[in-house]
Amino acid sequence: VRHNLSLNECFQKDIRAPNGKGHYWRIHPANMADFMNGDFRRRRAQRQVRRHNNMEVPSDESDDESMEDAARPPLPEHFKRSLEMHRQLEMIYGKPEQEQGQQQQHQLNTADFMTMAGAVAAETRPTNNTNTSR
């Protein structure tokens, strides 16, 4: 999975795990709106990352505005929860300094992260309201 994430400019490494192995991955801010709308095309994502980083965009990669937002499939529930968690973490810790043009990584307190993950999981856990009378 990490190899595929590293090949796609829509994703960027966020922090290193406390044991020093692996990384958390996040959606690049330039692509957040596309993912929220269910647009997972890599071509468009790369173009937006280039624009976000003030890089030149080749002219053959012009925007295809013919695709209407309403024609896109709805966003899966598990993905909506992941995006909501990402927003909550940004509210608590702020945006990574990397987005401000610096190459430092945003540090995150693991205990706080696990607490936040538990809270989001509890909010999205289905209730057991089955009616046993027939």
Image (cartoon, grey):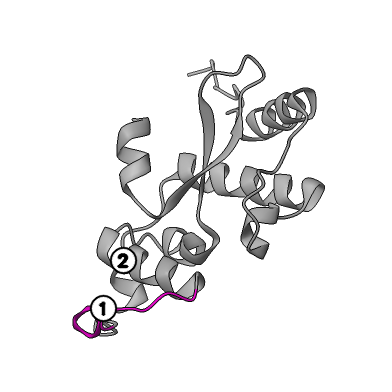
Judging depth in this view, the residue of 81 and 65 nearest the camera is 65
Q: Dot 1, how many residues are within 10 Å of its Cα: few (below 14), some (14-19), or many (20+)?
A: few
Q: Which residue is drawn at 33% across and 78% down?
A: 57
Query: Disc 2 marks which amino acid?
Result: Arg
The part of the chain drawn in magenta is 54-62
- Marked residue nearer the N-terminal end (1 or 2): 1
Where is mark 2, residue-wise?
72
Q: Is residue 71 above or below residue 99?
A: below
Residue 60 percent coordinates (x, y): 18, 82
Q: Which residue is drawn at 73% across and 32% down?
A: 116
- Look at the numbered disc 2 and give the secondary structure of its residue: loop
Q: Residue at x 53, y 15 (%)?
A: 132
Residue 79 percent coordinates (x, y): 47, 44
- The quarter of the picture where residue 61 lies is bottom left
Query: Disc 1 marks which amino acid?
Result: Met
Number of numbered markers: 2
Judging depth in this view, the residue of 75 and 66 nearest the camera is 66
* Main secondary structure type of the part rendered in magenta: loop
Q: Which residue is drawn at 77% across and 53% down?
A: 94
Q: Are marks 1 and 2 in contact (CB under 8 Å)?
A: yes
Measured Cα–Cα span from mark 1 to mark 2 = 8 Å
Where is mark 1, residue-wise?
67
Residue 121 vs residue 24: left or right? right
Residue 56 percent coordinates (x, y): 37, 79
